Amino acid sequence: MNRQLVIGGVIGAVAATAIAGVAGTDLIGFGDYADVVSVEPVTRTVTTPREVCGDELVTTTRPVKDEHRISGTIAGAVIGGVLGNQIGDGSGQDIATAGGAVAGGYAGNTIQKKIQEGNTEQRVEHVCQTVHETEEIQNGYHVTYRIEGETRVVHMEHDPGSRIEIENGEPVLDS
């Protein structure tokens, strides 16, 4: 066999293989890639309501029977009048009795008011309230990439790594 014929056949075979390999990569789908410049995780805040219950000690004022404090006023006026009557004699005694009754009535009313305000009761009540818990959850990534000298940003569900496959000038978002 001719040596030149063998060398020519080998060179031809190598060239045909190289051309077929380059053409085959385009047909198989080895597309273009864009370089990833940065990847930033995106989060969103989720608020979840939850009911919290517990026992609490509650103090309340007991209901009063004598809302206008008439019995304290009358008792104070009687005691004040009796004490005022012990002072002086004649018309001074009448004035002292009246003044004692008025002062005693006011004092009796005030004393009954303090007693009523201090008349409290305590009980344990089961109290519930709604609290809201918040948490940050992952919601994809903002990916900045560069293609043909232009920087673009796209939202992706996954971190693409160092490059993004490009098809028809647009990134392929499915992995």
Image (cartoon, rainbow, N blue to C red):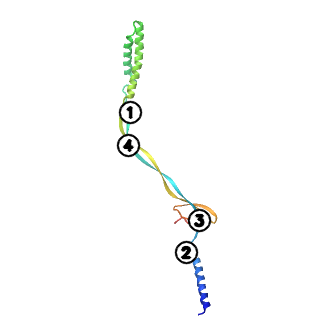
Instruction: Determine the residue positioned at 51% across, 54% down.
Output: 44
Mark 1–mark 3 CB contact (< 8 Å) = no
Instruction: Determine the residue positioned at 43% across, 45% down.
Output: 130
Question: Residue 106 location in percent, x, y?
Answer: 42, 19
Question: Residue 126 location in percent, x, y?
Answer: 37, 41
* In the displayed structure image, the side of residue 9 where residue 133 appears, left or right: left
Pointer 1: what residue? Answer: 60
Pointer 3: what residue? Answer: 35
Q: How far separated are the C-alphas under marks 1 and 3? A: 71 Å
Mark 1–mark 2 CB contact (< 8 Å) = no
Mark 4–mark 3 CB contact (< 8 Å) = no
Q: In which quarter of the image is residue 94?
A: top left
* In the displayed structure image, the side of residue 33 where residue 111 appears, left or right: left
Amino acid identity at mark 4: Gly
Instruction: Determine the residue positioned at 58% across, 81% down.
Output: 17
Element carrying mark 2: helix
Residue 67 visible in the shown view: no
Return the residue found at the far right: 149
Of callouts 1 and 2, which one flags the residue occurring earlier in the amino acid sequence?
2
Q: How far separated are the C-alphas under marks 1 and 4? A: 19 Å
Label number found at residue 54 = 4
Q: Quadrant of residue 12?
A: bottom right
Amino acid identity at mark 2: Ile
Return the residue found at the far bottom: 1
Determine whether 4 is above or below 104 in the image.
Answer: below
Determine whether 89 is above or below 148 in the image.
Answer: above
Question: Residue 145 location in percent, x, y?
Answer: 59, 63
Q: How far separated are the C-alphas under marks 4 and 3? A: 57 Å
Q: How far separated are the C-alphas under marks 3 and 2? A: 21 Å
Element carrying mark 4: strand
Pointer 2: what residue? Answer: 28
